[in-house]
Amino acid sequence: PIIVAATTFERALVLTLSFLLISYSSIIICRFIPREIVYTVRIICYVGVAAVMYIPTALLMNALFPETASAVSIYIEILVVAKTESRFYLMPMKEMALDALMYILGYAIAAFAVGIIREFLAFGSLFGLRVCDAPMPAAKTTFFGFILVGILAAVCRGVTTRRRKRSESSGVIRKGAE
């Protein structure tokens, strides 16, 4: 959804709020589905819970952002089907809740980075306020979204690799840096 729909800050905000409401509530509720249930049935239950959580989320987004929510609603619906992260249910409750929040925070950072950059390049505005003429109107296309996400992923990979090399050279080993 970020690649296609996050063309402005407001769209990124709607996607992020929807992802937060659907994902976090679904993860917490699905935690109570017994693990003894066959895996396939549990996944169907997870998607069912996410689908139920979509209804109040869609109503809230339509009330707060009527034009934007209707423009990105198909991508919010994709979040329902994509929300089957079963790894969360194998963790202790506190760890699961924190990990799920970090998962959503990562999504938010990506959505806002892409949305803000594309809004400036495609429309010449920041946070809905016109700053200049659109320097690159093609930035609103899906094609550009793929390119931008690829560039941002490469930058993140470079930063991570550099930090890992620094940690290894200083003798400090961090959890998760491997």
Image (cartoon, rainbow, N blue to C red):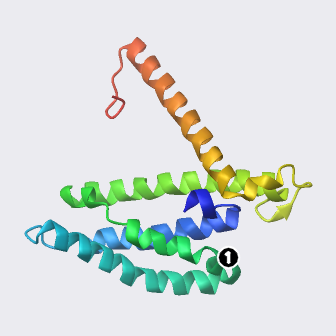
**Residue situated in front as seen by the camera: 92 or 88:** 88
- Quadrant including the C terminus: top left
Residue 14 at what x, y percent from top left?
60, 70
Residue 162 at what x, y percent from top left?
50, 23
Asked if residue 32 can be seen in this view, the reply is no
Residue wearing tag 1 = 68
Residue 148 at what x, y percent from top left?
65, 45
Residue 94 occupies quadrant: bottom left
Task: Identify residue type, mark 1.
Answer: Thr
Picture residue at 31% right of the left edge, 79% below the top: 49
- 55 displayed left or right of 41: right
Q: Residue furthest left?
A: 36
Picture residue at 85% right of the left edge, 56% below the top: 124
Residue 101 occupies quadrant: bottom left
Q: Secondary structure at mark 1?
A: helix
- 125 displayed left or right of 46: right
Picture residue at 71% right of the left edge, 58% below the top: 141
